[in-house]
Amino acid sequence: AQSVTQPDIHITVSEGASLELRCNYSYGATPYLFWYVQSPGQGLQLLLKYFSGDTLVQGIKGFEAEFKRSQSSFNLRKPSVHWSDAAEYFCAVGARGDYKLSFGAGTTVTVRA
Amino acid sequence: DAGVTQSPTHLIKTRGQQVTLRCSPKSGHDTVSWYQQALGQGPQFIFQYYEEEERQRGNFPDRFSGHQFPNYSSELNVNALLLGDSALYLCACGASGGADTQYFGPGTRLTVL
């Protein structure tokens, strides 16, 4: 069964500083990997996705993620955070031929001035 | 903007009642998945509908049922509501595939008293 672990429940970062959110997955085959962001009271917005190919994936809002098969990780990064990046971030895993996404518990990001 | 709409936005019910939630995908999307997101947790897959049939189901009891209409819109029905059913219910829509890319609606916040 596929599963996702986000080790950090809450991260606080200063505006302008870099951000890295960790994601580890468990899946037997080649996974499809996603990062979503959720602002308070809102649905989920897709930041980026990895299916195959280049292991460094660029997304919206200046985010990128790197797929490392040897570490079963798909960490999300942003070089310089903005106050508007404060939100909850979810890593998710899916698979070709499967129809569900399995989500981690999320990481809450707080941005301080 | 994912173009996915859900109604109602908020709903308050009492234990034992029944509820129906609605989701309309944007043009070009023909699969609808439903997820339950309890407070402080990641979304959990309930089921997916495609071609008006339930294609895959997560670990949810039969009290949770659904329907997809010819125009691809979908309903989620929950019978005999329990306090634990209080959550944000999200629908995610995609184009006749697996978990390739799903776009989420804003959700319906259900409170069971």
Image (cartoon, coloured by chain):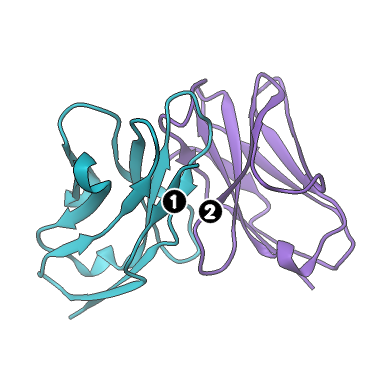
Chain colours: A cyan, B purple
Residue drawn where x is 64% and y is 42% of the image: B58
Q: State the SS at label 1.
A: loop
- Against A31, residue A16 (above or below) is below
Q: Quadrant of residue A90?
A: bottom left
- The nearer-to-camera label among 1 and 2 is 2
Residue at numbered disc 1 = A44
Where is residue B65? Give x, y as percent: 78, 40
Residue drawn where x is 69% and y is 34% of the image: B74
- Against A102, residue A111 (above or below) is below
Q: Quadrant of residue B112?
A: bottom right
- Against B108, residue B38 (above or below) is below
> In which chain is the residue bearing label 2?
B
Q: State the SS at label 2.
A: loop
Residue type at tag 2 = Pro
Q: Quadrant of residue A88?
A: bottom left
For the residue carrying disc 2, how many other residues have a C-alpha within 10 Å: few (<14), some (14-19), or many (20+)? Answer: many
Residue drawn where x is 37% and y is 31% of the image: A29
Quarter of the rendering occupied by the C terminus of chain B: bottom right
Res B43 label:
2
| Nearest the eye: B20 or B60 | B60
Where is residue A5? Give x, y as percent: 38, 57
- Against B19, residue A12 (above or below) is below
For the residue carrying disc 1, how many other residues have a C-alpha within 10 Å: few (<14), some (14-19), or many (20+)? Answer: many
Res A54 label:
none
Residue drawn where x is 48% and y is 41% of the image: A101
Is residue B51 among what the camera can see? yes
Q: Distance of mark 1 from mark 2, alpha carbons? A: 10 Å
Where is residue B111? Give x, y as percent: 71, 67
Answer yes or no: do the residues labelled 1 and 2 have beta carbons within 8 Å? yes
Residue type at tag 1 = Leu
| Nearest the eye: A15 or A19 | A19
> In which chain is the residue bearing label 1?
A
